[in-house]
Image (spheres, rainbow, N blue to C red):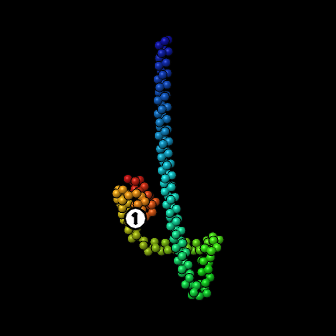
Amino acid sequence: MNQTVIFFLILSFLFNALSIFAIILLYLRQNRFARAEQNVNKMVKEIEDIFSVYLMELKEENDAFIKKMKAGRMKEAGPAEKAGPETEQPAPETKKPPETGETAGPKPDALIRTSANRAYRNAARQISGEQSEGQLQEEKSLLQKVNDLQQNGYTVDEIAQKLNKGRTEIELLLKFQTGRG
């Protein structure tokens, strides 16, 4: 009877040791999984931040383009007013939005956007296939320039300044390059 008690006692200790070992393994696996999930979430957040900054820069560029288009329209409207009474009516409408504020703003903005859209389409039709090959080589050479400058110790801001590109564009190039390699 003593031997059976000792046997069961030893067996109980072995089961306890195995249970503790299994608990430790499961805990480590769970921590590894949690860390991997945190890393993925962190990377997703970084990518979202980069894209949001890029979109903000793109929006600013578009706003600047729209302002230039408005200025060009106002310059065109000035000589057109002198030409005759038919052109006098559209000219005051283009001059009113800056004075009155945003109440009359959507109509000229829509007109500018449609004309800009047409200009983009016409330019795309004119350039077509030659540009795509040229763009690929230009992108490759831009990527090579960025890599060379980075290897020479330049920061992202300095690279962007040297190449006359946006900081976010350089960051995206570098990020996607490291993603491929």
Residue 74 placed where, x, y %? 56, 78
At a point 50% along the width and 48% down the height, the residue shown is: 41
Quarter assignment of residue 105: bottom right
Above or below for 179 versus 121:
above
Q: Which amino acid does label 1 sit on?
A: Leu
Residue 170 placed where, x, y %? 42, 60
Quarter assignment of residue 180: bottom left
At a point 62% along the width and 80% down the height, the residue shown is: 92
Q: How many numbered tags mark residues here?
A: 1
At a point 61% along the width and 87% down the height, the residue shown is: 85
Let me know if residue 107 appears in the view: no
Instruction: Return the residue found at the far bottom.
Output: 84
At a point 53% along the width and 68% down the height, the residue shown is: 63
Above or below for 77 versus 164:
below
Above or below for 34 versus 43:
above
121 and 31: which one is in front? Answer: 31
Let me know if residue 57 appears in the view: yes
Q: Left or right: where does residue 27 sit relative to residue 85? A: left
Mark 1 residue element: helix
Q: Name the residue under label 1.
A: 163
Residue 94 placed where, x, y %? 59, 77
